[in-house]
Image: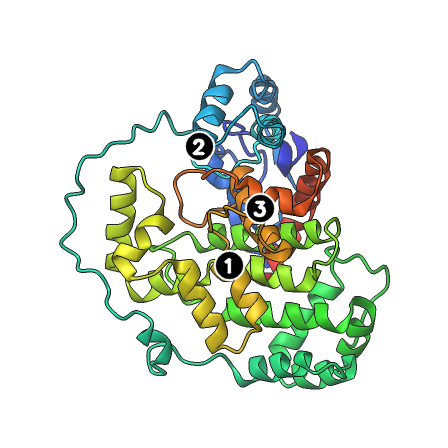
């Protein structure tokens, strides 16, 4: 047997030993031949290393090498995936080349490599489901869509006060023992790497900043609110991996873009698709019809949503954020993450829009779309970030995503 880093595991390898998670639960048994599905599960559970049968490891080393630029299968997949983007553009070319290495290292989270997608204008046959009318009324229905916990409103109000201190936030958060425990676990994790144990939320706010701790608390509260959605409607782990990665990407971009508030774009990135979750939770049949229509027509889900729901999930998400008393700036980040910007957008809106595209492009999780849209170059130019930084930004996302998802969602 050989111990192997999970990022170097490829389909076809054979487990040399049972895999147990941190709770003592058996994930996979010895002698299992691993597929993409099992490898994704290992990463989602934060399993750092596994034991591999030596023979399968030797046989698979050639497969790892096949993730090169000369591999026709890799090229075919990436050409299909980036078909809406101009590969002659330096930014797109940089991401494309980085994705070659990601495929070779099994970092794309797809069950299989899709073949050529043939778009057709053939009419969609499954249109018996009637469009949803007056969906905005759902927000006003306290029975169907109850308010978030009171603690959410208290934190939200507190951070709007310029005199708010770490002591004030700690006093609010400690009212919820579960939230307090989760926050302390995050602060003491490798995700932040403070180097010393933090035992109080007040000290955590001092170490990380009041706004950052508040943002974490708000994000955890909203994610917990949506945990009841069935995995049969969407792969929730994959969905939140995409969302958390988008938040991490936005926060990372913020360090390179002057005038951008990192905590705000993190929340905007984390919650940019909450509107789609509401659609899935309350209108599963309509969402199923929407997906079928998207596949048959070759159109993106967000472009078809107005016909099915009266508005996009981005617009609905922004209305929901306003109803929950998020700041107008955060609701704007949610609303405009799919916009086709003709002119240079505000920097924070551009950060979330580009982060959403980037996370989709490099294959971290899924928000439900079946194709990669074109990168909006007006949004990219708004950032003023050289493409040479993309490699380090993506590596930072990869380093943080496993740890972050473990605390935000599992």
Locate residue 177, reporting x and y percent: 63, 80
Distance from label 1 to label 3 (Cα)?
A: 16 Å
Of circles 3 and 2, which is in front? 3
| The furthest residue to the front | 343
Indicate which disc residue 235 carries.
Answer: none
Q: Is residue 269 above or below residue 212?
A: above
Identify the residue position indicated by label 1 in the image.
272
Find residue 83 and report its horizontal and vertical position in percent.
44, 29
**Residue, x 63% and y 31% (percent of image)?**
8
Residue corresponding to mark 3: 379
The answer, for residue 410, to whether it is visible in the render is: no
* Residue receiving disc 2: 84
Q: Nearer the viewer, residue 337 or 377?
A: 377
Q: Residue at x 53, y 54 (%)?
A: 243
Q: Residues within 10 Å of mark 1 (few under 14, many from 20)?
A: many
SS under mark 3: helix
- In this orientation, does residue 3 appear? yes
Give the position of the C terminus as an image quadrant. Answer: bottom right
User: What kind of element bears circle 2?
Assistant: loop
């Amino acid at each position: 047997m050989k111990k192997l880093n999970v990022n170097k595991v490829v389909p076809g390898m054979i487990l040399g030993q049972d895999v147990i998670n941190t709770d003592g639960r058996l994930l996979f048994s010895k002698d299992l031949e691993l597929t993409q599905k099992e490898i994704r599960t290992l990463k989602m559970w934060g399993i750092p290393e596994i034991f591999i049968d030596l023979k399968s490891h030797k046989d698979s080393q050639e497969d790892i090498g096949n993730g090169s630029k000369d591999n026709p299968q890799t090229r075919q997949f990436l050409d299909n995936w980036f078909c809406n983007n101009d590969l002659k553009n330096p930014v797109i070319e940089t991401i494309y080349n980085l994705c070659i290495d990601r495929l070779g290292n099994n970092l794309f989270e797809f069950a299989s490599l899709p073949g050529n997608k043939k778009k057709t204008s053939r009419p969609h046959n499954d249109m018996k489901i009637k469009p949803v009318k007056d969906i905005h009324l759902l927000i006003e229905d306290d029975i169907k869509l109850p308010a978030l916990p009171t603690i959410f409103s208290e934190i939200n109000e507190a951070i709007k006060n310029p005199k708010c201190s770490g002591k004030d936030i700690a006093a609010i958060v400690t009212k919820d023992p579960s939230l307090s425990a989760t926050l302390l676990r995050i602060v003491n994790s490798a995700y932040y790497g403070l180097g010393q144990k933090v035992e109080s939320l007040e000290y955590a706010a001092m170490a990380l900043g009041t706004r950052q701790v508040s943002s974490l608390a708000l994000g955890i509260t909203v994610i917990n609110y949506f945990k009841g959605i069935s995995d049969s409607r969407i792969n929730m782990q994959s969905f939140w991996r995409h969302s958390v990665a988008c938040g991490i990407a936005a926060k990372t971009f913020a360090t390179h873009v002057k005038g951008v508030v990192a905590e705000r774009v993190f929340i905007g990135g984390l919650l940019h698709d909450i509107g789609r979750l509401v659609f899935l939770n309350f209108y599963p049949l309509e969402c199923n019809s929407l997906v079928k229509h998207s596949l048959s027509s070759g159109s993106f889900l967000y472009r078809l949503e107005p016909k099915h729901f009266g508005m996009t999930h981005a617009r609905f998400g922004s209305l929901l954020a306003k109803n929950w008393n998020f700041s107008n700036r955060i609701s704007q980040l949610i609303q405009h993450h799919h916009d086709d910007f003709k002119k240079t957008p505000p920097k924070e809106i551009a950060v979330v829009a580009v982060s959403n595209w980037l996370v989709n492009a490099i294959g971290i999780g899924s928000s439900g779309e079946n194709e990669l849209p074109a990168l909006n170059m007006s949004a990219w130019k708004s950032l003023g970030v050289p493409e040479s930084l993309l490699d380090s930004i993506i590596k930072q996302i990869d380093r943080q995503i496993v740890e972050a998802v473990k605390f935000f969602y599992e």
